[in-house]
Amino acid sequence: MRMMRRGLRWSGGAVICGVAIALAETFVNYVGGGVTPWHVLATLVAGYAVAGAVYGALLGLVTARWEPSRAAVVAAAVFGYGLLRIYEPSGWKAEPAFLVLCLGLFGVLRGLRLCDRSSPGSRGTAECLTLALGAIVAGTFIVEEVFERDLKGAQPLVLLVLLPAVVLAVHRGIIALVRRPAVVVLAEVAVAIGAALFSAHPAVLQPLTAPEATAATTGTSPNVVLISLDTVRADHLSVYGYGRPTAPHLEALARESRLFRNCYSTAGWTLPSHASMFTGLFPRTHGARLAGEYLHQTDPRGKPMVAYPLATDHETLAEILHAHGYATGAIIANFSYLFRDFGLARGFEYYDDAPAFLFRYRPHLVRFVERFSPSFLLKPYRRAEDINHTALEWVGQHPGRPFFLFVNYMEAHHPWIAPPPFDGWARSAPVLPQSHLDLYVHEARTFSPTEQTTLAAHYDGALAYIDEQVGRLLDELRRRNLYDDTLVIVVGDHGELLGEHGMIGHMGRVLYDGLVHVPLLIKYPRGGPTGVVSRPVQVVDLMPTVLDAVGLPVPAEVQGQVLPDVTHEIVVEEFINRRLAEHYGKRYDREQRALYRDGYELISTSQGDVELYKLDTDPREEHNLATAEAGVVQQYVAQLAAWETAHPVEIARRDGTAVGETAARLKALGYLQ
């Protein structure tokens, strides 16, 4: 009975300690510009409480026959909390070393009596635990985020032990002078919290709002709904002939729309492609692109930015529609490169770019659980169903006004974790020696057929979920009698490589077809034209097409054309990502251009590399015809050079505002390492 009471007492104390840790981590995350919504906080509190209850009960039972010293309690708490970070389910490696270090910590605390001058009894123990665990939480955040030290190997083990020892040693010195332990602890905690709040940079969560349009529209102005499918490649959608039924709702939409079979992005990543949709300009003109170098301005973590925001002197689609009386609203899931700091929010009365959650300080509990369940609190962007809910709520607030609604879905972006029942293909995929999450890499390597099959299964499930949400959004527009009078555009901003050419992902890598060939469906209002269009087009053509459909003039500077009558060259461009070039070598230290013409794809780089593919007979781009068809290469290279001469690169602003919170958002989605 005595052992049981002891176990329960220690278990209760550890639960309180666990809850305090969850709150401390949440506070540090807030200070650093992270986001911890209530449901995430509740998950952390519950998880730490359960972990504390189990760990405390075990400690209570083990120590039932003696009364451990305060130093032993502190060392045991450090070990338990640190173990959540360093435990590896594949085998015990660092854990014994960490145990030895914590025994050393116990020896230091006891030998130097670093805890003994605190308040008497359990209050003194709580004071020492607060300082020791608080040192770990605050100290690791400062080391990893402020000083940007990527703790690997033995470093986190040493740091987790060193920080409590140093803080408690300083604390003992102060008590020796003041001789009021409780007052000292309260003062130390107050100073720490005050300094943190003084330097805090809370994340932007409230939607960006602007005054409503004052100009009147005509009574026949149609609504516009632009649905951006982030990271969706066309050839994995069943509406484009893919074997799996990944897009039944898009198939239904295609029967009353124009489906563009050969639509291409203007770049291989989010920011420049969306800027092209909104401005009708190529990246070299609108300015929202990779800089090719580091920007002069750095973020608080010390990392200079590599991408410019949208230049302020180019009018956006939202600005034009807003000026003509439209209600304009955007609800987006890609909170990184569609964050308002990059300039794409201009013209929107309502721009909601909040993440689902955002970790600047990754809780130890999350690190631990992800060892067993890799998807635990992994997707920081909002789900498509949540995007729909907010979007429809916004639409309902503007009765009687034509509206421009922009929604962005993110599930096809890595880590491609589809919810049930859309995860069926992934669950039946070949079992890999590592999670598919571990396959997402920047460097080029060879991926086995098994690995590529598994990647495709996860990706396809995410596409099926997105398709379901597109269908639900359109069904609700029908229910509200808005669908018939609405111009509906469904488009991908770029694709994703799934192991082809030894690459996974997007941005700054290559310009192969799987990365830049995107879906495009346009449902015109009031029974407009339908059918399949095979002529190559680009996302740069969306802005003039929308303006033409709603009866507004197209600005003279626009480089895109009204669909489907496109005659401009189909060019995709990628500038240098300086950070990738420094980390992954020569393959990334190059500008790239892709020209699509007469069924061919020409890829040319600033390093002099040239590739040529005949896409109708070689859709996987396995046979480079650059040598065999040198005449075609020479002709296309000359045409590409002429296009570049006619479209000189405009010098973008070098003092971009993409700092601070923006860096955290980019890191959350893997754009910063």
Image (spheres, rainbow, N blue to C red):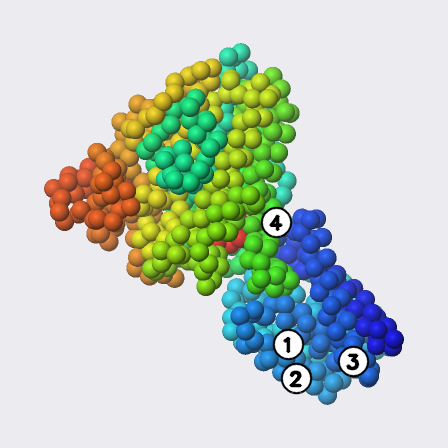
Query: Going from the N terminus, do you reach mark 4 or mark 3 first?
Result: 3
The reply to whether dot 1 and dot 3 touch (C-beta < 8 Å) is no
Count how many numbered circles sit on residues in the image: 4
Foreground residue among 72 and 309:
72
Look at mark 4 in the image and give the residue it sits on.
Answer: 357
Label 4 amino acid?
A: Phe
CB under 8 Å between discs 1 and 2: yes
Q: Which numbered disc, 2 or 3, marks the residue closer to the eye? A: 3
Secondary element at tag 4: loop
* Mark 4 vs 2, N-terminal side: 2
Q: Give the numbered dot on residue 104.
A: 2
The answer to whether residue 393 is left or right of residue 59 is left
**Amino acid type shown at disc 1:** Val
* Within-10-Å neighbours for mark 3: few <14, some 14–19, many 20+: some
Asked where in the image residue 59 lies, by quadrant, the reply is bottom right
Give the residue type at disc 2. Answer: Gly
**C-alpha span from label 1 to label 3:** 22 Å
Circles 4, 2 touching at the beta carbon (< 8 Å): no
Front-most of residues 612 and 62: 62
Residue denoted by label 1: 161
Q: Using the numbered discs, state the Cα–Cα distance from disc 1 to disc 4 in whole angstroms.
A: 29 Å
- Using a 10 Å C-alpha cutoff, classify the residue at mark 2 as few (fewer than 14 neighbours), some (14 to 19) or many (20 or more): some
Mark 1 or mark 3: whose residue is earlier in sequence:
3
